[in-house]
Image (cartoon, rainbow, N blue to C red):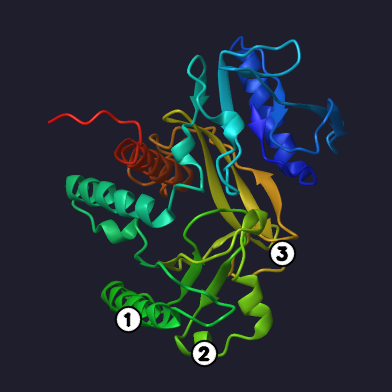
């Protein structure tokens, strides 16, 4: 397993250690190999849980990738490749590489994924006879934006204005008495960087130098030039009075669990993936298909955990369509 290069986030390291435990239970032998040039020898990191994780330097031969005295059959990437595709991962013709390299953020775009998810949600909505907007936030995309220099802002302003107007119409249709907002974020990359909430198009004109600098680079120092503008959805969940958002974890096509990302210092319309965030396990113990014990069928309140799993599976289906359509090595048939 190839994890992210950073080692300061103990929540993340505990997460990949849990993945190792799951694979061990399935009878697999797992070790961790790092892409970082700083990892020159096996490095053991102690975690607050009392456990430890050992990360080793990757070793590349002509056609295979492994570790010292360890020749794996599969390389599992838990690294989003924001900084680009390293040559050490290319041309592995005798090993499985999961997911494929074109699933990394150096190639992938959120706007492409959400176009695919939009199609899936429309088909799903048609099957059930529901408005797909209920499970699919609206979005727009701008390709050439430079916050530091102030170029490309016209595209951003136009799209933010149009999206806020569309959301207002939907709110009116459904009797939602809230102020619409959008979230402007990097079209590639994760890690909670290059994200801002916009409630009024005038906010874009009033951006100060600090805000512009924050929006100029994303993870691994990559410059931000492409943005996606997404309809904002209020985060109504709470854990110990802190705003909490559910994250659903899947392996293959199966929902295997989840967690809440919580942040006591952030509001219901702000990005929670920021310093100060913490994580709480979110158990999917019940199937959600059954009524609550002792209640008549149909009288129970909806099991929102099950609904989160439905959305996750639709998103996974969309991701599979997306990767299939963008596969650079796909065979083309006439």
Give the distance between the C-alpha atoms of the residues marked 3 and 1, in whole angstroms. Answer: 31 Å
Asked if residue 111 lies left or right of residue 71, the reply is: left
Q: Secondary structure at mark 1?
A: helix
Q: Secondary structure at mark 3?
A: loop
The residue that label 1 is drawn on is 165
The residue that label 3 is drawn on is 264
Q: Local crowd at mark 2 within 10 Å, few (<14), some, or many (≥20)?
A: few
The residue that label 2 is drawn on is 205
Residue 236 in percent (x, y) is at 53, 63
Residue 90 in percent (x, y) is at 53, 29
Q: Secondary structure at mark 2?
A: helix
Q: Local crowd at mark 1 within 10 Å, few (<14), some, or many (≥20)?
A: few
Residue drawn at point x = 66 percent, y = 68 percent: 266
Q: Is residue 205 above or below residue 100?
A: below
Query: For the image shown, how many numbered marks are present on the structure?
Result: 3
Q: Earlier in the sequence, mark 3 or mark 1?
A: 1
Give the distance between the C-alpha atoms of the residues marked 2 and 3, in whole angstroms. Answer: 29 Å
Q: Is residue 166 visible?
A: yes
Give the distance between the C-alpha atoms of the residues marked 1 and 2, in whole angstroms. Answer: 18 Å
Q: Is residue 122 above or below residue 197?
A: above
Camera-near label (2 vs 3) is 2
Camera-near label (1 vs 2) is 2
């Amino acid at each position: 397993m190839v994890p992210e290069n950073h080692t300061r986030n103990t929540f993340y390291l505990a997460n990949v250690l849990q993945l190792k435990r799951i694979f061990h239970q399935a009878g697999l032998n797992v070790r961790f190999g790092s892409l970082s040039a700083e990892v020159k020898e096996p490095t053991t990191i102690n975690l607050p849980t009392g456990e430890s994780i050992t990360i080793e330097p990757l070793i590349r031969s002509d056609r295979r990738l492994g570790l010292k005295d360890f020749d794996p059959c599969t390389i599992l990437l838990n690294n989003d490749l924001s900084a680009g595709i390293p040559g050490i991962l290319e041309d592995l013709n005798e090993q499985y590489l999961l997911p494929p390299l074109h699933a990394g953020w150096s190639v992938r775009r959120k706007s492409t994924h959400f176009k695919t998810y939009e199609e899936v949600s429309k088909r799903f909505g048609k099957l059930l006879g529901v408005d797909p907007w209920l499970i699919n936030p609206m979005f727009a995309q701008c390709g050439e934006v430079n916050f530091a220099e102030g170029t490309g802002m016209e595209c951003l302003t136009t799209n933010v204005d149009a999206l806020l107007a569309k959301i207002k119409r939907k709110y009116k249709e459904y009797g939602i008495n809230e102020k619409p907002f959008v979230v402007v974020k990097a079209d590639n990359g994760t890690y909670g960087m290059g994200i801002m909430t916009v409630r009024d198009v005038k906010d874009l004109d009033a951006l100060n130098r600090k805000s512009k600098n924050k929006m100029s680079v994303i993870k691994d120092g990559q410059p931000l030039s492409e943005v996606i503008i997404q309809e904002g959805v209020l985060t109504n969940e709470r854990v110990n009075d802190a705003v909490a958002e559910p994250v659903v974890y899947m392996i293959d096509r199966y929902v295997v669990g989840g967690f809440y990302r919580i942040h006591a210092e952030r509001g219901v319309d702000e990005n929670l993936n920021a310093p100060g965030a913490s994580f709480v396990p979110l158990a999917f113990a019940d199937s959600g298909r059954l009524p609550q014990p002792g209640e008549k069928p149909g009288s129970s309140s909806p099991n929102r955990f099950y609904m989160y799993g439905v959305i996750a599976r639709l998103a996974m289906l969309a991701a599979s369509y997306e990767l299939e359509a963008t596969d650079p090595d796909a065979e083309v048939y006439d």
